[in-house]
Image (cartoon, helix red, strand yellow):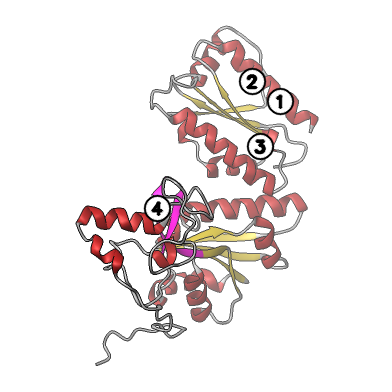
Amino acid sequence: MIRGNNKIVAFCCENSAYLAADKAGRMRLHYPDNVRIIRVPCVGRVDLIHILKAFEKGAAGVLLIGCHEGACQHLTGNTRAKERAAYARNLLKEVGIDEARLRMANIAPDMAQQFVREIEDMTEKTKER
Amino acid sequence: MIIAERKPLEEIRGMIAGYKKILVAGCGTCVTICWAGGEKEVGILSSQLRLASSGEGTELSIVEACIERQCEKEMVEELRDKVQDVEAIVSMACGIGVQTIADVFEEKPVFPALNTTFMGMPEAEGVWTEKCRSCGDCMLYWTGGICPVVRCAKGLLNGPCGGTRKGGSCEIDPEKDCAWVLIYRRLEKQGRLDLMRKYYEPKNYRAVKRPGKIEALKA
């Protein structure tokens, strides 16, 4: 994590969050430009090391955005990601990084506004700290 | 297999304090299976160490490696090129691996990143339980393949104590089964319940001289 940096890495499931981000673009919704979206086949693909590496490379916050619970195409990808995020928060705590800098969210492909809110919220949170 | 747990980050950081270039070496066998010291865990620990040291503004360069087995000198030799460039080695293997590395690279300090805990097997995802205490005098043939030495909280050899709970759990921990109830049920299935009446003499815990050594080729 680099002090003063406000970059946010958002790992987005290609079946929900990535489509919501795309829709936000088509709807011309404005959201902070500090976010870097990484498209993943399922949010369950995001491993602990990906989260840690994002912070190592200077991210101020990391978002894991997947489908709603029960709607994962791979059945348990989003619930596994939720558990992994909880575990990763402990790893971050050990190195002195505020746990709130990592968040897991669930959205549907048509929830463009919710996607924007998640980005805005994380941007605000990382500014405060 | 050998089960181990990673030490807290603070303890590992305390060990390597003052070193600027280290090798974090994983082991691809037992500790990979128990999620303690495989390739993945090497990456996580290294990343955590880098994040913690950059947070404090200290310099730390880490070389990451994971070999098939750290308990064999020939395999540990694979690390030689990487070891030459570092000041210290953090081994993410069991105590055997740590000592093998320390023997092979005597000139470098070697630090254990894991606490080696027991010999066991995976029970469920992320759950391992102890199954053998390597007493050197196996009695599993009388007990239906269930070891009372390790699975009975008191290590009793001649039936249960008086504290077995209703339902067959242990008086010390209701989450654990009474080993002798398990043994009874297993022998019942096998039609060998008469073995419950067998008297076992006090166990010879000196069957294995410590430190243990086996010379298979010695006549």
B143 versus A9 height, above or below: below
Query: Who comes first in sequence, dot 2 or dot 1?
Result: 2
Question: Same chain, marks 2 and 1?
Answer: yes
Q: Is residue A83 left or right of residue B217?
A: right
Q: Is the magenta stretch mostly helix, strand or loop?
A: strand
- Nearer to us in this view, B157 or A30: B157
Which numbered circle lies on residue A123? 1
Chain letter for mark 1, please.
Answer: A
- Judge whether residue A56 can be spotted in this image: no
- Label 2 residue SS: helix
- Outermost residue on the left side: it is B191
Q: Residue B10 sits in which quadrant?
A: bottom right
Q: Which residue is under mark 3?
A: A59
- Residue closest to the eye, B79 or A42: A42
Q: Horizontally, is B51 left or right of B119 in the view?
A: right
Does A34 sit above or below residue B171?
above
Residue type, mark 1 in image: Thr
Task: Kindly identify the amino acid type of the residue bearing the numbered disc 4.
Answer: Pro
Q: Which percent across, then down, holds residue B207?
A: 38, 83
Other-residue count near label 2 (Cα within 10 Å), few / some / many at <14 / 14–19 / ≥20: many
On the same chain: label 3 and label 1? yes
Do the residues at pointers 2 and 4 share their chain?
Answer: no
CA gap between label 4 and label 3 equals 36 Å
Name the spot of residue A121 as percent of width and height, x first: 70, 21
Label 3 lies in what chain?
A
N-terminal label among 3 and 1: 3
| Magenta range | B117-132
Which residue is identified by label 2? Answer: A118
Q: Nearest to the eye among marks 3 and 2: give it.
A: 2
The residue at which mark 4 appears reads as B122
Q: Is residue B199 magenta?
A: no
